[in-house]
Amino acid sequence: MSESRQTPSRHYAVCPHDCPSTCALEVEKLDDNTIGRVHGSKNNSYTASVICAKVARYAERVHHPDRLMTPLRRVGEKGIGVSAFEPISWDEALETIVDRFTQIEQEHGAEAIWPYFYAGTMGWCHRGANHRLRHAKRYSGQKETICISISDAGWKAGTGSKRGVDAREIAESDLIVVWGGNPVHTQINVMTHIAKAAKQGAKLVVIDPYRTPTAAKADMHLMLKPGTDGALACAVMHQLLKDGYEDADYLARFTDFDEDVRQHLADKTPEWAAQITGLSVDEIIAFARLYGEHKKSYLRLGYGMSRSRNGAPNMHAVSCLPAITGAWQYPGGGALYGQSEIYKGMDRAPLHGTDLADSSVRELDMSRIGPVLTGDRRDLGDGPEVKALFIQNTNPMAVAPDLNKVHEGFRREDLFVVVHEQMMTETAAMADIVLPATTFLEHDDIYTASGHTHLQVSKAIINAQGECRSNHDVVSELAKRLGVDHQLFEVSALEIIEKSLQDSNLPTAEQIHQQQGLDLLGSFEESHFLNGFGHADGRFHFYADWQALGDKEGVLPRLPDHAELIDAADAEHPFRLVTAPARTFLNTSFTETPGSVKKEKQPMAFIHPEDCDALALEEGGWVALGNSLGEVRLKAKPFAGVQAGVVIVEGIWPNHAFIDGIGINALVSAEPALPDGGAVFHDTKVWLKAGRS
Ligand SMILES: Nc1nc2c(c(=O)[nH]1)N[C@H]1C(S)=C(S)[C@@H](COP(=O)(O)OP(=O)(O)OC[C@H]3O[C@@H](n4cnc5c(=O)[nH]c(N)nc54)[C@H](O)[C@@H]3O)O[C@H]1N2
Ligand SMILES: Nc1nc2c(c(=O)[nH]1)N[C@H]1C(S)=C(S)[C@@H](COP(=O)(O)OP(=O)(O)OC[C@H]3O[C@@H](n4cnc5c(=O)[nH]c(N)nc54)[C@H](O)[C@@H]3O)O[C@H]1N2
Ligand code: SF4
Ligand SMILES: [Mo]
């Protein structure tokens, strides 16, 4: 029955985590229930055998002693570290949910039930399970704003289409600019391709408020203040135009650049930007010249610069650079933010249950789960309060903004919460019913990628652990018991995937799996926008139409600029906080694995040594960070790789890792960013005090 433990077989799979790399994996299978090491596949030219350490150690997660194995019912009071649970059968768990959902629907209407999910798995079938259920039942919908809505708007304002130059072309670039991303932590494969270019003499520039491990590898690191990228980009454009580095022919043929744009940039001098960014005039000019001199320049744009109230205009301003120099025309030149439109030929209707959708059903903003659960009428309108949550693939008790409000909402006694999870997260701890979920090693799914262009199908390698069930299986069973009669809930995950592929005229799931992915990369002309940009006029837009993207009141600047919308430091809150990703966590996933916890140790605030002196803070001493939304306490770490007045906290640690039991997002506002919502994780003013232990 079981295979030999001596010679593990290797099986292709796809990393399901919310990471632009979507790596092709080779998983060692020890027996039908057990995996060994996980490796990067050499057959995928983007993965190129490399994966991150946390997934290489995936056995720690899938076989974690605390992995959820049976359905559970909470007994007694709820709270992190307070809730107690008893095992129940699947039948009992599902019947309890059906009874409560039916009762809530009868008393308050279907919209009082809110299926809440995100990208804990990026697989379209198990990620979309919530969509299928909510459409079928007309439960409240979810506006997906927590990660990409600000950056998408910023990128699309200029290019009109979310795709860009293939990352494998980086090998041909002579200058790579990693702007607002930290790939050493967040998508290691970018570094593989940069290393190839570096061997040919390419230079690396990193633009980030702190000296990340990526910045530490750079030839030039511009350590700007958070939320000031628009100013830097404008000054770079100013200097490029002043020094004659623009490609006038390209600008005329491919963009809407005109004399007014030139005039507008004329006073965006390096001196002006130096004031705003905290960089020196020399640094700004040196970067502009480097960029101007290298036409095969590749911008790898991260999300970091977008997680601010002015994030969309910042992203747009930065995306204007290759249009000025015409870098788009050259191999290894141009920019990449994300590749999702490469996959537009894939019909996702079966995966989303679109046929069942009713557009009159309300959508609630997921980033505002705190205000929503505490009854904010700006969110609820005249609809019902949320009385039940059905949660898959996300951990809002830690990851969502305005965390004190989120906790207050989850504590409501009249809120019925179901959490389908792999681990006893802090969100699961607040549930009435907890359901155990399979991992990607135990179910089948289909994956697109943001950092590359392969469509991949992954299949189960080991048996479902304990009584774990997949998202699709749980949602299908629930839908049937709730009286829904639809084909989508009668078939397997693989059958839904096949239907989607068939409707898209793509090869079968089996074929795609067999060949370990289908590369959908378009032609050079296509990926470099030489056939035209995504707007109706085919041009790159220096003039951003923010109104069309949702900025109804026209607050955002039409032309690239520094928009003064950020939560600027003031006398009472002299510091700006950036809550950046930790290397061996992925959001809160892996905060439970021993290998990751050992590496990350504990939450720490990186503070400039001068600020530490002024506040009498010592290495390892406690520091309190606070603002009108809350207060958190953690260890201080004097750190010279950041401007004075800026504080960096890496990782979304569990609340219980902080002394007061509330995590870093207690300080982050849930105010939606323009033009169409989004969470502003790196845009927070705070005060600092030496704290007690
Ligand atoms: N190890 C690890 N990998 C991850 C994740 C993780 O938590 N850990 N998260 C995953 C997810 S969900 C996502 S969306 C991606 C995110 O991947 P990235 O795009 O790399 O991450 P960001 O959170 O956007 O932050 C990246 C960098 O932006 C910087 N930054 C913050 N504010 C500004 C600013 O105003 N301007 C500039 N120029 N830079 C700024 C931060 O200091 C940080 O170093 O990574 C994914 N991969
Ligand atoms: N302070 C701060 N906060 C942030 C960010 C930041 O940079 N700073 N980044 C934000 C960003 S970009 C994002 S995308 C969000 C992400 O936040 P989340 O989407 O909440 O990501 P995770 O914390 O990784 O939680 C995903 C959960 O899904 C579960 N899961 C995985 N696969 C499956 C499955 O197949 N079925 C089920 N039922 N569950 C599964 C995992 O066990 C895990 O607990 O966090 C945001 N929060
Ligand atoms: S780098 Fe990203 S996609 Fe690759 S294995 Fe690690 S988490 Fe998964
Ligand atoms: Mo994200």
Image (spheres, helix red, strand yellow):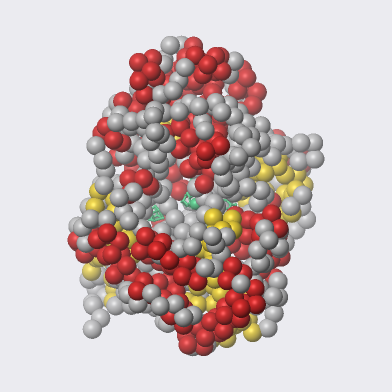
Q: Where does the image place residue 492, in percent across and percent down from the top left?
A: 32, 74
- In the visual, does 683 lie left or right of 470? right
Would you say 205 lies left or right of 401 here? left
Residue lying at 41% horizontally and 24% vertically, measured from the top left:
255
User: Which quadrant, please, contains the C terminus?
Assistant: bottom right
Count of numbered labels shown in the rendering: 0
Q: Does residue 300 appear to the left or right of 588 in the view shown?
A: left
Residue 265 vertical position relative to residue 555 in the rendered view, above or below: above
Q: Is there any visible trace of residue 27 in the rendered image?
A: no
Please give the name of the residue rendered at 61% of the width and 17% of the height, measured from the top-left corner. 271
> Compared with residue 488, is residue 272 higher up or lower down, i.e. above or below?
above
Q: Position of residue 513 (x, y in %)?
A: 23, 61
Residue 463, given in percent of the width and then of the height, sits at 33, 77
Q: Nearer the viewer, residue 353 or 458?
A: 353
- Against 572, is 457 above or below? below
Q: Residue furthest right?
A: 572
Residue 343: x and y in percent read 32, 49
Q: Nearer the viewer, residue 674 or 655?
A: 674
Q: Quadrant of the N terminus?
A: bottom left
44 versus 479 height, above or below:
above
* Residue 171: quarter of image: top left
What residue is at 53 percent from the left and 16 percent from the top? 260
Name which residue lies at 59% across and 15% down. 267
State the residue in front, 682 or 38.
682
Looking at the image, can residue 158 be seen?
Answer: yes
